[in-house]
Amino acid sequence: MTATIATAKTAAKVSAAAAFFAKTSRAFQVHGANTEVGKTIFSTVLLARNNGDRIPTHYIKPVSTGPAAEEDLRHIKQYSPKTASECLVQYKDPVSPHLAVMRDFQTPLADSDIVAEVRRSLTAISSQAGTQNSFALVESAGGVLSPGPSGSLQADIYRPLRLPALLVGDAKLGGISATISAYESLFLRGFDVPLLLTFKEDRYRNFEFFQDFFAKKNVEVAAIPAPPPPLPSLEEDVFQMQDYYSEVSNSDVIKQANDYLTDFHKRRLSDLQSIKKRASETIWYPFSQHSLINQSTIIAIDSAYGDFFQSFEDNSSSLEPLFDASASWWTQGLGHGNPDLALTSANAAGRYGHVILANTIHEPALKLAEKLLALTANPRLSRVFYSDNGSTGVEVGIKMAFKAACARYNWAEPETDSNSTGSALRDIGVLGLKRSYHGDTIGTMDCCEPSVYNKQVNWYRERGAWLEYPVVKQVKGRWVVENLETGDIVEEFNTLQDVFSLDKRDRKTFESYKTTVLEAIKKHLDAGKKFGALLIEPVLLGAGGMMAVDPLFQNALVTAVRENAALFGAQETNGSNENDWQGLPVIFDEVFTGLFRLGHATAASLIQVHPDITVNAKLLTGGLLPLCTTMASNNIFEAFLSAEKVDGLLHGHSYTAHPVGCAVAAASLDTFQEMSDNGAWNSYKAAWDGEKTWSMWEKAFVAQVSHSGKVDGVFSLGSVLAITLKDDISTGYASNATEDFKSYLEATDTGSFSLHIRGLGNVIYIMTSQSTEPRTIGHIQSLILDYLKTN
Amino acid sequence: MTATIATAKTAAKVSAAAAFFAKTSRAFQVHGANTEVGKTIFSTVLLARNNGDRIPTHYIKPVSTGPAAEEDLRHIKQYSPKTASECLVQYKDPVSPHLAVMRDFQTPLADSDIVAEVRRSLTAISSQAGTQNSFALVESAGGVLSPGPSGSLQADIYRPLRLPALLVGDAKLGGISATISAYESLFLRGFDVPLLLTFKEDRYRNFEFFQDFFAKKNVEVAAIPAPPPPLPSLEEDVFQMQDYYSEVSNSDVIKQANDYLTDFHKRRLSDLQSIKKRASETIWYPFSQHSLINQSTIIAIDSAYGDFFQSFEDNSSSLEPLFDASASWWTQGLGHGNPDLALTSANAAGRYGHVILANTIHEPALKLAEKLLALTANPRLSRVFYSDNGSTGVEVGIKMAFKAACARYNWAEPETDSNSTGSALRDIGVLGLKRSYHGDTIGTMDCCEPSVYNKQVNWYRERGAWLEYPVVKQVKGRWVVENLETGDIVEEFNTLQDVFSLDKRDRKTFESYKTTVLEAIKKHLDAGKKFGALLIEPVLLGAGGMMAVDPLFQNALVTAVRENAALFGAQETNGSNENDWQGLPVIFDEVFTGLFRLGHATAASLIQVHPDITVNAKLLTGGLLPLCTTMASNNIFEAFLSAEKVDGLLHGHSYTAHPVGCAVAAASLDTFQEMSDNGAWNSYKAAWDGEKTWSMWEKAFVAQVSHSGKVDGVFSLGSVLAITLKDDISTGYASNATEDFKSYLEATDTGSFSLHIRGLGNVIYIMTSQSTEPRTIGHIQSLILDYLKTN
């Protein structure tokens, strides 16, 4: 295992591939709307223009096939002799690189290697230039989406660099369509396209159309005459072309275009330089104490790709990759800037925009609902209600459960007398777990115990009762179940798999859990509390401090509630169907833990319980857009049926089931399912204990962490790694115990990237997406071990 | 005015342009990845294939230039002689249609006319075929985005029909890029692309790449040999081509492709036929009584464009345009399926996906915040807080206001003892207006008076006091301000402009409003109530029944609160800055009324008040995605500053300020602003009383409605039309008074489209987007007048 980590550490490249950027070094990528549109001619013109201004120029042709590269380089050398030029990779056959690779019997160059090479070149140019201005062009091969050596599309390959794109338009008949389509392909991948270059052609006059069309898109259009037809004598032809370049590169059009690029670069730089200050004056940050925020603490994110932000560093005026270690508040599953999700979202936006979902239906909403019901594989669930985020989804779940409980237990309607200070009915609360967290709306805050989260909200009133529970963690190589109050070890296990193999767990523990739970519930009921729902986060309590609850305990809790219905109310009719709720409607808040976060479609499956209501959000859209579903059983649904409109569930947001979110969610779930089916996570499963409990973090690494003297315990499942540090001074949210660790991790470069971490009291957690590469994880593991060993 | 309405009524075409669809009539559109890729050859092959199966075939070339159309039609006639073919519009010059139009000195055909013509043809084919199968191809000119006669891009022109696209790929070098880009351009406009057709070319073998690539996109790929080179003898060439077509159209590849298209059509049809039933079994609808919903009440929305849903009609098995009269729950401003917003959303998705907004900043979030602050032009506002919908945004506003009030008035922190039943502090409530509505989360429901909306929610506890107010409406041609309790007319006016010219209004009325308000507030305070905020919907109370409040009253209310700070608490320091809040923090819920809904950037400007906190959502993203902003003054912001993390505003959703929503919102606000600057609404303004109070509904029409015996009153401002019907039996939400009117409007076809209406008690409201065409509005006005006259 140490070997594995070492290997990962020495791997020089990661898919992050920092974008090149510098104050003085202007760099652009030249893309073609088609092949044979004159990319190299326009490159030469712009390079010659800058040479004329005595600015050092560079030309990079990353990949070329056949004699084209040599010809292009020779052409540049001939007509812009001061330009330093290079071709990084060259294939013999003058066909598309993906074919040339096959025909040369070569192993195709990985996309990330090409990006790394271009970055290396550009960085060298930048440091060579120092404080002097420089101008560099990276010219791609063929059209914007021509395949590279690996078969990936060029615009996708170069996307991590996100160099501003100079698009060479097609002046021929049909060229308008090809050019605008090419522009759209670049734009939907997140590229800036400051300039369109095209030949002035008089028959079809595409350039005129471009000037009108692209003005609305803030794309500058520069049209120049095409080169004259070649002359039979090579020497004369060279003179003719020298004249052409001399004339064109000194033309007003090209001067203006070049000035525009200089301005564009300056604007981009000054935007990046000013954005932090402007944000510090304008944005009211969520969940933040603003006295701790200022322009020097704020991170400017220019773009993001895969697991990485590209953040702007003031000191170096450069863009650097920053690993998104909170998975952007636990949302990311399929990588930032995912082009497939971008296209899927555009398709739904183009097909529908948004359409109301009240007595109507559209395909994305139905497909997603059916997919979720199938994926959840819970025979109780039959209905899907849409809302916008986990908080609203939990509120919906509570409204569902309370109405069902009131109906079953025949509790009276609430008083509507405006002078009443609250009837008994209004004092119904939830039964939950301590340190739970269900969102920030007032309704969801009220169903958590008093805490630092809600004590500052002047409208908070706790509504419920919250039970203590034993937690799971790895300590010095052993998996233990610990009583949180006493600190006693309840049970010990060799593997995490053993903890989650509920059927093999000690029945005595199970029975004692039930007894404890029932006693606690009875105490609360005797004190006059009334419950309308059991509401828990299965397996892992997120914002409460990444607490892993003993799965056997959560199973026992639900079992106890269901077996003791009479405790909660005098019911006339019990649920008659085996899928009807018993005792209390059981709501699982899987906003954080569901949909493959913990390696499974549901967290419920890990504790072997079928809830009556399940809430999903966050990973639902793969990490792109807000969307939430609250699924419920038919038995719950029926509590709202009557002849009266007002008996319905009177909840609905304007953008309920917005088609874009639903389409993206359906595509994301398909992708997760395909990854699962195609064995994308099989190596992790094999390295851990099999299908049930596996993590993207290495088993031996987690064990090693658990041995550290600084560590109280560690837990890992799916993409989550949570390290609880020892902290004698303070505990909980207000703790600063993790500051030192966090600072180390953020300040230390892995050699390829830095980390962006959100702390959580004395817990450091790092969450990958569901598609993070092992070598990236390897880098982070090394960093963590380095800290724990040496600090 | 009657003339105007009549003109609008007789106009045969609207931009809706229902999509063609029928059970037996398969229709597809053939698009080219470029020009000269063989569209007509592939059309001929598919038509010949269907002729071989004895299926009637049709070929439509809507627009053609130069001799191409005749050549294409001749080619079809020659090699698929049984096909009925037609060209709808033809231009002489063989250049792009937008140029041909200019060179022929013709008025370009409107996009909607082309669509209407194609629709007419396809409908004729469909009714001619009856229960027999038929097969029709519509072949576009040039590439997918080649401009049509008006200069609009072809894929945009034909988008309302949304015919499934057959894309002819480019087999040449560079053709991979052109083909995939063309596919993306179609896909991001919401087209289905079931089939890619391409020639088998052995040098570059693009077809092999396509087969791999498009398999992942669910696009079938059919590759056939290219036709042989033409022979010198015309006769021999014809024989050669006949052989070619005979061979190719009978090949397995084309048989399979054709079968695939047949299956695709069947699947689409069966999906549309089953979607309602499946929805009725799976979806839990928002704000609905499910006993009133079943598969026959549900509307299946296949797509949407502009102001129209394309809904599937079971009886005719066809797609029909349905005007979205609720603007999809008041969200729509720039039209469904807007291609610019689709591309903008894709750009942000491709550039970022989502990135966390906690101590970070990205360009869309900052730009939108700065734009909103500028647009709102309220010197008090300086900070923008993001959340996901109006409901969460109002909760944020309340948290902000209450904390500020507690700090100013030195009210103690709430008790956190879990056994307390609520301290005095927890009983702080809002001061509001009766019939207000601020969303469906429990916190926002609690700040509305008890009503049918919240009385079913078992967790509702009203927290505040709500005042009565006079309303504005037009009755029998006169604008009146009416006392709602007594039904007395307080004041009468000639124009709506007069009502809103607050400076010219009677000072006595103003003073009497203030006196009334203060008395009511004192009464509540004396009864022990405590207020933390004044929360109102300015001008128009939406869900409460489209109540227009006398703007002078709302102005007087805010003034009274601000002038009588001592009433609300014993403050140590008054706000020292003129932009500090006084009395109570004033929150404006502009979720419904803001951002040009009522013709102005803010509704606040109509009542000449600067709130301390403003909430915006709905129109914010032009109608595409959920997003909400809560803007606040610096004085409110400062109440949260301290050295302690937990004193911050502890609210934040995972997708806070999601870049896609922010980018779309910024683009939408730019578009609204441009429309305003470019005079898009000038004709409406001129027809009404000028800049201040204008509506997209005609002034004379509104007056005419106000004279109807069925109508209690009517109100119109911006895009909103609200007609309150007389209703002696019941009032409010539960009323069925509007059912007859609604049924009439929904059942009666305007000749071009039907309406989809959401009722609201005894109010029928119709809301256009900010870009609805006058002739569409004219159709609806006629329909309304017809009902009011005759029924």
Image (cartoon, coloured by chain):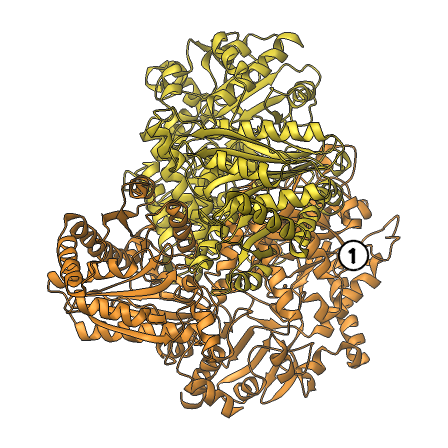
Chain colours: A orange, B yellow
| Residue at (44% x, 25% y) in the render | B718
Quadrant of the frame with the C terminus of chain A: bottom left
Question: Which kind of residue does numbered mark 1 sit on?
Answer: Arg
Of B179 and B563, which appears nearest the observer?
A: B179
Of B650 and B218, which appears nearest the observer?
A: B218
Quadrant of the frame with the N terminus of chain A: bottom right
Q: Name the residue at the bottom extreme.
A: A3
Q: Which residue is mark 1?
A: A380
Vertical order, B215 against A283 (above or below):
below
Q: Position of residue A165 (x, y in %)?
A: 32, 57
Q: Position of residue A696 (x, y in %)?
A: 57, 77
- Asked if residue B290 can be seen in this view, the reply is yes
- Asked if residue B626 can be seen in this view, the reply is no
Of B413 and B186, which appears nearest the observer?
A: B186
Disc 1 packing (10 Å; few <14; some 14–19; many ≥20): many
Q: Position of residue A422 (x, y in %)?
A: 66, 43
Q: Position of residue A537 (x, y in %)?
A: 64, 64
Of B175 and A366, which appears nearest the observer?
A: B175
Q: Horizontally, is A107 left or right of A547 in the view? A: left
The answer to which image quadrant residue A466 occupies is bottom right
Q: Horizontally, is B564 left or right of A196 in the view? A: right
Q: Secondary structure at mark 1?
A: loop
Vertical order, A5 against A523 (above or below):
below
| Residue at (72% x, 68% y) in the render | A605
Q: Horizontally, is A479 left or right of B295 in the view? A: left
